[in-house]
Every structure is written in C-alpha cells, then in structure tokens.
C-alpha cells in the first residue's frame, strides 16, 4: 500500500527512482497490496456456514474472524502494483489505500496471526462446523 506521503505516483519506467518509505522498502512482497479483506455478515446458521464452505473451496479464498468480525480474505495482487512496491496510480488511489498507514501494518503482524479463527480450506472449515453444530451432516435436510 505504501501509504506514506513520500511515495509518489510512478509508472514502470520510474520504478527504482521512487523513494519508498523505509519500512515499506523492507516489505519486499508489498503485503497490503496483494490481498482484499471483505467484511461479511457474521455467519450463524448452518446455511451461512455451508455458503462459506463453498467460498473457501475456491483457490486463494479464505475466511477469518478477528476482533472486527468476519471477513473473506482474497489473495489477489492489485493490478496497479508495480515491481519494487510502487503504486502506479498513487495520486488517484482509492480511499481504502489512502487510509491505510504502516504504523502497525501487515508487515508487523499478518492478518492470519492476528485472527481468532482462520479457515483456508473446505476441510478446515468443515471440521469447525462439525464441532459447532451437532447435526451438521444433516444440514441438507434444510433445503428440501
Ligand atoms: S504491509 Fe505495511 S510495510 Fe508492507 S507495503 Fe504495506 S504499509 Fe508498507
Ligand atoms: S491502488 Fe495502489 S496502494 Fe492501492 S492496493 Fe493497488 S497498488 Fe496498493
């Protein structure tokens, strides 16, 4: 995300000339620009969790819960991120990017480490569902 003001709009030719913030320079994978965290309603019912099972069955989709609630985590690189950690639309980047600071960011603690619950696969989430709901294997009866 390179949220500090020192980082300037750049195009591919400018990469290498741009002064990145010291901390962001160390973050060689530009962690905050290679995923999306989308808040979702708190799942409560078997139907809710069955839907999440479908979502985490897809590549690069996880679901997690932290102090702010439940989120989908989508592991996907921003198309504006240039090699070297430069944002190619820096002056025009979306608000969510502008708000993000590197004071304490994903470089300090990953979202996964900060989360209370993290499910990256169908298998892991289903194990949780079996513990959470007594009659989990009979959930399809809800739909008929
Ligand atoms: S995760 Fe933090 S250190 Fe890394 S690029 Fe983003 S703001 Fe900078
Ligand atoms: S728009 Fe720029 S700052 Fe925002 S995620 Fe993409 S590369 Fe990062």
Image: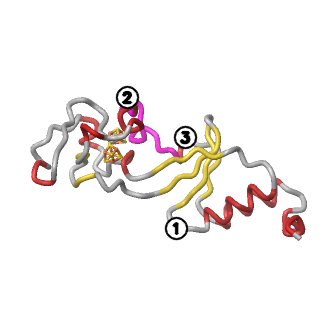
SS under mark 1? loop
Q: Which residues are magenta?
A: 100-111
Query: Quadrant location of residue 9?
Result: top left
Reading the image, the residue beneath label 2 is 103
Quadrant of residue 7 within the rendered picture: top left
| Horizontal side, residue 7 vs residue 14: left or right | right
Verify CB contact (< 8 Å) between mark 3 and mark 2.
no
Q: Crowding near pointer 1: few (<14 within 10 Å), some, many (20+)?
A: few
| Residue 110 screen position, x and y as percent | 47, 44
Secondary structure, mark 3, is: helix
N-terminal of the pair, mark 1 or mark 3, is 1
Residue drawn at the location 19% of the way across and 37% of the way down: 8
Q: Residues within 10 Å of mark 3 (few under 14, many from 20)?
A: some
- State left or right for residue 118 relative to residue 12: right
Whether residue 99 is in magenta: the answer is no
Q: Can you say whether 8 is above or below 129 in the image?
A: above
Residue named by callout 3 = 114
Which residue shows up at 39% across the image and 45% down it?
A: 32
Labels 1, 2: front one: 1
Quadrant including the C terminus: bottom right
Q: At x 47% / y 50%, what residue is drawn? A: 36
Please tell me whether mark 2 sits on a helix, a strand or a loop. loop
Q: Residue 37: percent from the left, percent from the top?
A: 51, 47
For residue 59, which numbered disc appears in the image? Answer: 1
Image quarter for ligand 1 equals: top left
* Left or right for 21, reference 127: left
């Amino acid at each position: 995300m390179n949220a500090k003001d020192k980082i300037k709009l750049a195009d591919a030719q400018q990469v290498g000339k741009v002064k990145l913030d010291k901390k962001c320079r160390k973050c060689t994978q530009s962690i905050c620009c290679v995923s999306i965290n989308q808040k979702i309603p708190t799942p409560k019912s078997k139907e809710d969790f069955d839907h999440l099972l479908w979502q985490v069955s897809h590549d690069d989709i996880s679901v997690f819960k932290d102090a702010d609630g439940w989120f989908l985590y989508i592991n996907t690189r921003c198309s504006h991120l240039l090699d070297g950690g430069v944002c190619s639309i820096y002056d025009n980047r979306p608000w969510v990017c502008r708000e993000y600071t590197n004071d304490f960011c994903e470089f300090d603690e990953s979202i996964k480490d900060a989360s209370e619950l993290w499910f990256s696969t169908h298998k892991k989430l289903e194990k949780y569902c079996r513990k959470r709901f007594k009659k989990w294997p009979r959930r399809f009866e809800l739909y008929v």
